[in-house]
Amino acid sequence: MNNPCGQPFQIVNVTKGGVVVARRVALAATSSERRKGLLGRDSLGPDDGLYLAPCEWLHTFRMRFPIDVAFLSPHGRVLSVHHGLKPNRLSKIVLRAEGALELSAGVLRASGTEVGDTVQFLHASVPELAVSITSVP
């Protein structure tokens, strides 16, 4: 569930001056990766995350822990957020979203990330190399 180069992404909030939102974000780009998502995990580390694309809504059925979710436009703009979405719930449908960034509960507030902000995907091993999320399969 990593990017095509096999490395996780680092997510930074450029609106907030480059604040790191998550250091290790995997990509779930195939149908089977998106269906599995975070199922089967007991927790998600504070620096870890999963980006599901395409994705306009999600559920937390059979999950064991709450998550933060940011729905992103194709250019990384935060369109909608869920703070601490509990297990066995449905998110809002965000029709303009390209994907959903799933993070440990509390990460969005801790990083100050909110609707209207723009986040950027960087290669975790080479943070200087920015990636447009429109180029992520």
Image: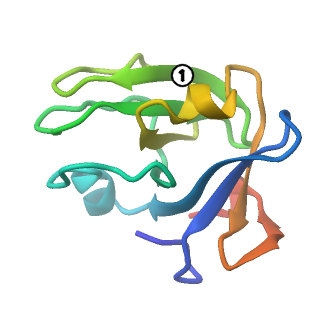
Residue 10 can be seen, yes or no: yes
Q: Nearer the viewer, residue 43 or 100?
A: 43
Residue 57 found in image quarter: top left
- Where residue 71 appears, x then y in whole percent? 55, 31
Image height check: is 34 above or below 26? above
Q: Is residue 97 left or right of residue 117?
A: left
- Where residue 62 appears, x then y in whole percent? 10, 37
* Residue shown at the point (52%, 82%) measured from the top left: 6
Residue 94 can be seen, yes or no: no
* Residue shown at the point (46%, 48%) measured from the top left: 46
- Where residue 9 appears, x then y in whole percent? 61, 65
Residue farthest along the right direction in this orientation: 17
| Number of residues whose C-alpha sits closer than 10 Å to that of mark 1, classed few (under 14), some (14–19) or many (20 or more) | many
Image height check: is 40 above or below 71? below
Residue farthest along the bottom direction in this orientation: 5
> Which amino acid is tagged 1?
Val
Q: Is residue 68 left or right of residue 127?
A: left
- Image quadrant for the C terminus? bottom right
Q: Circle 1 is placed at which residue position?
A: 81
- Where residue 10 appears, x then y in whole percent? 65, 61
Residue 102 found in image quarter: top left
Number of on-image labels: 1
Q: Is residue 59 left or right of residue 113?
A: left
- Image quadrant for the N terminus? bottom left
Residue farthest along the left direction in this orientation: 62
Image height check: is 16 above or below 109? below
Secondary structure found at label 1: strand
Rendered image coloring scheme: rainbow
Q: Is residue 13 left or right of residue 103?
A: right
* Residue shown at the point (41%, 41%) measured from the top left: 104
